[in-house]
Amino acid sequence: MTDKKLLTLFNRRDPCAVAKLEQAYGKSLKSFAYDILRNKEDAEECVNDTLLDVWNHVPPAQPENFWIYTARLLRNNAMDRIDLMKTQKRDVSYFSELLDELDDRIPFRETTESEAMYQDLRNRIEQHLRSLPEEDCDIFLMRYWYAKSIGEIASVVNLKENTVSVKLHRIKNTLRDVLEQEGYIV
Amino acid sequence: MISKILMRAINDLPPDLIERADPRRYERHKRGTLKFKTVAATLCFFFLSALILTTSFKVFNDWDSRPGSSHLYFYYNGNMYHLYKLTTLYEGPWEDFTYVGEIVDNGLKYEKIDLYGGFSGSLYVYNEDLNFALVQIHGAFNENGDPVYTVFYAPYDPSTNKRPPLPWSKPGELITDVFDKFFESYD
């Protein structure tokens, strides 16, 4: 089913909409949730929460790309779930390590700045990623957006694990330099 | 711990970047590449098969009209067969021709084969069970002086000892089935 048809079903508040969405992207969403949470049950619950979120947000939201829209919601839900898992003293080591390695290179300054400043930050990161070779940008996002392991990325892009690690290290260094110049990094 | 605002900024990157980095896209691309490679390999296989099949029917006829020195070499399925050696120079009309050569032992069983032929540098082999003349080779030369051989096959009745009636197979026609049948009959 196309995204356009899905959107029509959601706008009509058709009860089939969620089932159709799950049919179209359920498998990918589960896989994505598992990549972040590394737990099957949590991943399934996270997907269900996300599907419900889509039902609650569309309309008024009118996503053109349902995969990206749903994956974003799922990512946010997964982050919230990780916070919950942490309070429950459950193992979240995979995602923590992933964030730690980013934090290690980019010690970001916690701020309470306005939405405008947030947009500026987002634009800087986007500009920097777009200035990178396409493969480097993809590797960065596979790691920090799709939460893929180094091994998985290496397999997908057909490079050695060590090469992927080195590339990520360099990308983070250059991103740090950019954000440092802008005063986002302490 | 990394700031949530940085995570949010990464989370909110534009869809085109996110979609491009989607590992599933890479998998599809990889599968596409694989599919392309498979198709290319298949095409290559067919091309090579065609090449091999073409050369399978290659006939080497070392013909110089002297008894004992004219030979037919037949290349089939990667094997070279020395099918025929001229032992008697044939000079009369074709209809009077009875036997001009002998089949050289090359691992095939020949008891079912009779050998006829011998006009214009041509000959053919008759298979009794299948009741057709297997090969007819007309020696010719191209503009470079290289020998060019055309392979025919045709139904043939050796009892009449006559040239097979027309139509024969077309010059250069691939007659794989016929050759396969022919060789299978010796299994």
Image: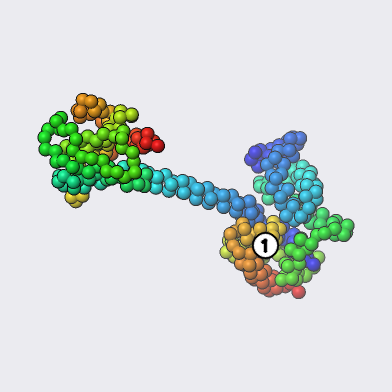
Q: Nearer the viewer, residue B75 or B144?
A: B75
The quadrant in which the N terminus of chain B is found is: bottom right
Residue at screen point 20% across, 28% down: B161
Instruction: Place residue A171 in its image quadrant.
Output: bottom right
- Give amino acid for label 1: Ile
Mark 1 secondary-structure assignment: helix
Q: Is residue B101 above or below residue A134?
A: above
Residue at screen point 71% across, 48% down: A29
User: As drawn, is B167 to the left or to the right of A15?
Assistant: left
Q: Residue furthest right?
A: A88
Mark yes or no: residue B55 visible.
Answer: no
Measured from the top left, where is residue A156 in percent x and y? Answer: 61, 57
Instruction: Place residue B131 in its image quadrant.
Output: top left
Mark yes or no: residue B132 visible.
Answer: yes
Q: How many marks?
A: 1
Give the color scheme: rainbow, by chain, secondary structure or one colour.
rainbow
Measured from the top left, where is residue A31 in percent x and y? Answer: 71, 50
Measured from the top left, where is residue A12 in percent x and y? Answer: 73, 35
User: As drawn, is B145 to the left or to the right of A6?
Assistant: left
Residue at screen point 33% across, 38% down: B109
Q: Nearer the viewer, residue A168 or A158?
A: A158
Q: Nearer the viewer, residue B187 or A116?
A: B187
User: On the image, numbered disc 1 is attached to which residue?
Assistant: A150
Q: Residue furthest left?
A: B92
Q: Chain of mark 1?
A: A
Instruction: Place residue B183 in its image quadrant.
Output: top left
Measured from the top left, where is residue A66 in percent x and y? Answer: 68, 46
The quadrant in which the C terminus of chain B is found is: top left
Q: Is residue B36 above or below residue B9?
A: above
